[in-house]
Image (cartoon, rainbow, N blue to C red):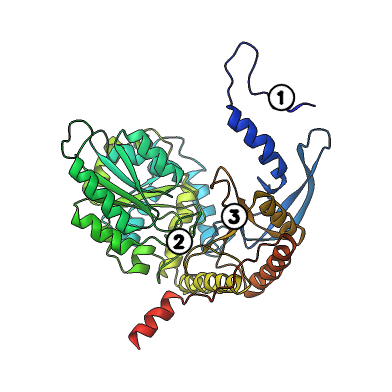
Amino acid sequence: MLYSEQYPCHVQGYEPLCSGMEDFYERRLYLRAQDCANRPISSAPDSWIDVVERYTNDNNKTLHRTTNSTRCLNLGSYNYLGFAAADEYCTPRVIESLQKYSPSTCSACVDGGTTKLHTELEELIARFVGKTAAIIFGMGYVTNSGIIPVLIGQGGLIISDSLNHNSIVNGARASGAAIHVFQHNKPAHLEEVLRKRIAEGQPRTHRRWKKILVIVEGIYSMEGELCKLPEIIAICKKYKAYTYLDEAHSIGAVGKTGRGVCELLGVDPADVDIMMGTFTKSFGSFGGYIAASKEIIQYLKHACPAHLYGTSMSPPAVQQVISAIKVILGEDGSNRGALKLAKICENSNFFRSELKKMGFEVLGDNDSPVMPIMLYNIEKVAAFSRECLRNKVAVVMAAFPVVPLLLSRVRICISASHSREDLVKALEVFSEAANLVGIKCSRVEPQQTRAEENTKKLE
């Protein structure tokens, strides 16, 4: 069967739905590695998962599922603290909330979709991150793309990190504000861009900007890097710009008590104007939040379409987040939260250090549970992924268009639920797969952890 017959890009008499570039990508790249993408699982995303086996039909190369599954070590889920599986404290309370409130409110927050649980979570998340108020949403992506256009519009200026998430990019585009980017995680270039844009003013009229919003992430999901938040905050204060911090991957995952990059880097949350985060990673649920001053949150509740018209979070999902935060804070009556936080930090630094010793090129900073391993060539990424799966290790490949064409990588996400034996097994499998595809390209001495650096300074 011809490609044009299997994947028609247009119907006779109609304009094509897909561009030629999209067709080229699917035909030349995606179809050659489709077995490494969209792998279905049939279990909770714990440290080990059941990956459903698939086979291809030689005629059209379409993947078909089977009834069989393979038990694999999970290195791809954002299950940073291990709350995605059954938990002795969270699960009974989630089941109880399901019986009391039902799976859904079937309503937007303002139309009867706000239960006592929703109010409790908003108060709890505000207290957890160190802000006076918070608002929650049913989807993390919408939290960015729906909030940014409400905060700033025409006559405003958005300065965005060049590697910010797509939800931030689309939210900025929808706002109508002028958008400029600064080089990834380079405060000096941020200051250069700010100074220039403030001096020039708005296009054509050269009037002063109504407001300026600088948007950064706590941990960059495709780079594993921590934001240089102290330096960025200092620059924003100097030029009277507002700061917007996306902590989707850092809240709950880093910091002594799990409060994110502000705690890890010693930044006062009061210096960050807008704090955004999601519940899909560390808390084992879904949805997102915005934490800020009471005035800003009150404004968002009256002006944000994502709050006014979007369906509110499922009550059991809300209860999951509440329970997870209480475990982290030790309000469940145990020290499991502290142990989880210590475990993810230990696991992350151990795994990163060992990968570098073996010669892998690993991006990111110490203490970050996100570890991209650079493979560059898309064929090597696919071969690496297949070899890992053959040895019962499940990884996620990140290739074009998620990252630039020549910067393909495998992204590893470490969890507190991983044992040392799990990580050692993964390292052994990675070493064998790397020798097969030839990706060990450097031998760099591992960096010291922040804790070790601070200890040296004190000495």
Tell me: residue 246, above or below residue 88. Answer: above
User: Disc 1 on helix, strand or loop?
Assistant: helix
Looking at the picture, tell me which residue is in the foreground, 370 or 209: 209
Q: Between marks 3 and 2, how big is the CA–CA gap? A: 15 Å
Q: Which residue is mark 2?
A: 225
Residue for point 54% across, 47% down: 404
Residue for point 24% across, 41% down: 299
What's the amino acid at mark 3? Arg
Query: Based on the displayed image, in which of its 4 quarters is residue 424 positioned?
Result: bottom right
Which class describes the residues within 10 Å of circle 2: few (<14), some (14-19), or many (20+)?
A: many
In this view, the residue farthest toward the left is 207
> Is residue 428 visible to us here?
yes
In the image, is 403 to the left or to the right of 243?
right
Looking at the picture, tell me which residue is in the foreground, 411 or 105: 411
What's the amino acid at mark 2? Glu
Query: Based on the displayed image, in which of its 4 quarters is residue 356 positioned?
Result: bottom right
Query: Which sits earlier in the primary sequence, circle 3 or circle 2?
Result: 2
Q: Which residue is mark 1?
A: 4
The quadrant the N terminus occupies is top right
User: Disc 2 on helix, strand or loop?
Assistant: loop
User: Disc 3 on helix, strand or loop?
Assistant: strand
In the image, is 91 to the left or to the right of 253?
right
Which class describes the residues within 10 Å of circle 3: few (<14), some (14-19), or many (20+)?
A: many
Query: Which sits earlier in the primary sequence, circle 1 or circle 3?
Result: 1
Query: Which sits earlier in the primary sequence, circle 1 or circle 2?
Result: 1
Q: Which residue is mark 3?
A: 409
What's the amino acid at mark 1? Ser
